[in-house]
């Protein structure tokens, strides 16, 4: 990759913290010494072969992974340093093995394509967002509180969270779906937007949603609905 498309990012130094073992939907980040970022804050367990396709037709290859906590596309250079991809206005798309990522400049975030049906595309935004700060209570428990002493801080999710040694920050995974169809703009997935994008088939789409009890928070349901709608 060309140097002017990249910026050295001291990724690990952003995390003056330890990661608690949690489910995939929740992260507890505790104040403490610097440690390597746990693999589960990334889209993939390991860095995979990826290719950045630039708008001018050039491309660059490296081992890549998407960081859901920082909202950054990371790669490993020849010196085995972990870097963040920048110059995103020059990027057309990023392919990591069979997956495709696009940068949404309007919302300053990466979207992963999860399905494509002719002129219709379904994309998803997945990232960890700050929820609350908790403080140690009696018997080793934690309670929600505002940080009162700034001894360490965490820079993630576009913000800085100050923590004292007996506190941790709770991050919750945010999942949002978007679609693009018939040459239109990228829009959030909602029932109303489906009806706007396919105005000539409102009755058929409404019947499909009712019959299949479409859950707009479930990826497989959205794939089925978009596949059906785009085929009308």
Image: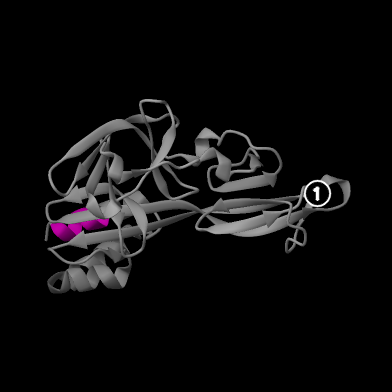
Residue 107: x percent and y percent?
36, 63
Q: Give the answer, above or below, for where 39 lies relative to 172.
A: above
Q: Nearer the viewer, residue 19 or 33?
A: 33
Does 95 lie within the magenta span?
Answer: no
Render colour scheme:
one colour
Regarding residue 203, the answer to whether it shows in the image is no
Viewport quadrant of the C terminus: bottom left
Residue at the image point whose x is 55% and y is 36% from the top: 37
Regarding residue 4, the answer to whether it shows in the image is yes
Q: Nearer the viewer, residue 8 or 232?
A: 8
Residue at the image point whose x is 51% and y is 55% from the top: 157
Q: Is residue 164 left or right of residue 66?
A: right
- Name the secondary structure under disc 1: loop
Residue 53: x percent and y percent?
20, 42
Viewport quadrant of the N terminus: top left
Residue 88: x percent and y percent?
29, 52
Question: Badge 1 local density, few (<14 within 10 Å), some, or many (20+)?
Answer: few
Q: Give the answer, above or below, for where 12 lies relative to 171.
A: above
Does 227 lie within the magenta span?
Answer: yes
Q: Residue furthest top?
A: 79
Residue 209: x percent and y percent?
29, 63
The quarter holding residue 58 reads: top left
Q: Is residue 123 left or right of residue 83?
A: left
Q: Which residue is mark 1?
A: 141
Q: Which residues are magenta?
A: 225-230
Q: Main secondary structure of the magenta part?
A: helix
Q: Give the answer, above or below, for where 34 lies relative to 70.
A: above
């Amino acid at each position: 990759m060309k140097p002017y498309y990249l910026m050295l990012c001291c990724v690990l130094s952003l995390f003056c913290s330890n990661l608690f073992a949690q489910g995939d939907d929740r992260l507890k980040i505790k104040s403490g010494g610097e440690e390597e970022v746990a693999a589960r804050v990334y889209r993939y367990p390991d860095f995979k072969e990826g290719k950045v396709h630039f708008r001018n037709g050039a491309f660059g290859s490296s081992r890549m992974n998407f960081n859901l906590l920082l909202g950054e596309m990371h790669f490993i250079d020849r010196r085995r340093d972990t870097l963040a991809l920048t110059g995103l206005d020059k990027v057309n798309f990023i392919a990591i093995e069979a997956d495709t990522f696009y940068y949404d400049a309007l919302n300053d975030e990466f979207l992963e394509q999860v399905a494509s049906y002719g002129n219709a595309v379904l994309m998803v935004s997945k990232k960890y967002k700050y929820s609350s700060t908790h403080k140690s209570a009696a018997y080793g428990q934690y309670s929600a509180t505002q940080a009162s002493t700034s001894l360490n801080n965490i820079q993630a999710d576009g913000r800085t969270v100050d923590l004292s040694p007996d506190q941790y920050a709770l991050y919750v995974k945010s999942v949002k779906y978007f679609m693009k169809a018939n040459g239109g703009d990228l829009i959030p997935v909602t029932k109303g937007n489906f009806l706007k994008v396919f105005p000539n088939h409102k009755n058929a789409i409404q019947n499909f949603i009712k019959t299949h009890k479409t859950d707009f928070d479930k990826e497989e349901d959205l794939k089925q609905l978009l596949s059906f709608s785009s085929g009308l």
